[in-house]
Image: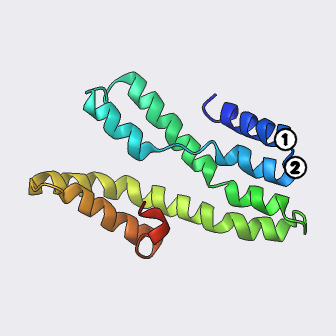
Amino acid sequence: MGVMLPLVAGFGVACALRHSYSEALFLGPLLTATSVGMTAPVLSDVRALQSREAKIILGAAVVDDILGLLLPLVRQLTVRSGAHPVGLALTAAPALSFLVVAVSGGIPFAPRLVSLTQRLRTRGVLVSVAFSFYTAMVGGPVPESQLG
């Protein structure tokens, strides 16, 4: 429901507001994005991070974010040139490659990284390490538009 409701509602509202079909097709998936970065600290603050409900919420948020990787495919489907199989493959390849590298590298690496940051017992070290990890994953610094 966390994915389907925003997807269908966004598409429906865009169509009701007389946006083009391609704009509506893009807006629906755009609304499915969640923020694990905001949800996890809130659950941690109320000391519910290890609860079954929190695991379900965070799992669903991760699935939402993975589905967000499909947004470039939606855009490719809505461009005027149409959906050419080669174009779709070239659009999907970077997102899928990133997902494979992030999961295969993150699963063995993340616990070690968290353990190291906990041993340092210095304020702000986890944020610094997370920022460095993000920078390494995206291949450069955070764009100014994302700094808020």
Residue 117 lies, with reference to residue 24, above or below; the image says: below
The residue that label 2 is drawn on is: 21
Residue 41 appears at what percent x and percent y? 32, 39
The residue located at (76%, 60%) in the rendering is 75
**Residue at screen point 61% across, 61% down:** 96
> Callout 1: 10 Å neighbours few (<14), some, many (20+)?
some
Front residue of 19/94: it is 19
Question: Tag 2, which secondary structure?
Answer: helix
In contact (CB < 8 Å): disc 2 and disc 1 = yes
Q: Residue at x 87, y 63 (%)?
A: 83
Q: Amino acid at mark 1?
A: Cys
Regarding mark 1 in the picture, which secondary structure is present there? helix
Q: Residues within 10 Å of mark 2 (few under 14, many from 20)?
A: few
Sequence-earlier tag: 2 or 1: 1
Which three-letter amino acid code belongs to the residue tagged 2? Tyr
Q: In which quadrant will I find the C terminus? A: bottom left
Residue receiving disc 1: 15
Residue 131: x and y in percent read 32, 63
Check the image and name the residue furthest to the bottom.
140
Rounded to the nearest whole Å, what is the CA distance between mark 2 and mark 1?
7 Å
- Residue in the image at 75% along x and 66% along y: 89
Number of numbered discs visible in the structure rendering:
2
Q: How is the image coloured?
A: rainbow
Left of 100 or right of it: where is 15?
Answer: right
Q: Quadrant of the N terminus?
A: top right
Query: In front here: 48 or 90?
Result: 48
The x, y position of residue 73, in whole percent, is 74, 59
x and y percentages locating residue 16 in the rendered image: 84, 37
